[in-house]
Image (spheres, rainbow, N blue to C red):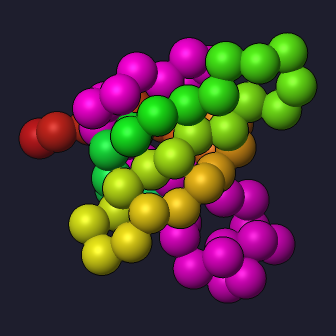
Amino acid sequence: MIRHPKPGQAVELHYRQSLRQLTGLHLICGSVVTSGKGPGPRNALVDLGHKKVVVPCGQLFRRVVS
């Protein structure tokens, strides 16, 4: 899990089993556009190529490039 994502960082979205069908974003790769700094919920704007989505930082994992 990435706690403080940096703009441009490659990420992969991970969701728990019960939310995978609902969101349709499990294991999708993208890059961080920006993230919240605040004391409240920390979210990040992620560019998936075809759209941009706001996700909680708890769903972000480093993308492993092979």
Left or right: residue 29 compared with residue 60: left
Left or right: residue 26 compared with residue 49: right
Question: Is any atom of residue 28 visible in this view?
Answer: no
Question: Is any atom of residue 46 visible in this view?
Answer: yes
Residue 38, position as x, y percentages in the image: 77, 18
Residue at 88% from the left image edge and 25% from the top image edge? 40
- Nearest the eye: 15 or 43: 43
Which stretch did the figure color magenta?
1-26
Quarter placement of the N terminus: top right
Which residue ends up furthest to the bottom in the rendered image?
A: 21
Residue at 85% from the left image edge and 15% from the top image edge? 39
Above or below, 15 against 19 in this view is above
Left or right: residue 13 compared with residue 23: left
**Looking at the rendering, which quadrant does residue 9 occupy?**
top left
Which residue ends up furthest to the right in the rendered image?
A: 40
Q: Is residue 6 magenta?
A: yes
Above or below, 32 against 50 in this view is above
Residue 15, position as x, y percentages in the image: 66, 58
Quarter placement of the C terminus: top left
Residue 23, position as x, y percentages in the image: 66, 76
Residue at 57% from the left image edge and 40% from the top image edge? 44
- Nearest the eye: 3 or 39: 39
**Looking at the rendering, which quadrant does residue 6 occupy?**
top left
- Nearest the eye: 28 or 35: 35
Above or below, 3 against 16 in this view is above
Q: How many marks?
A: 0
Residue 50, position as x, y percentages in the image: 30, 75
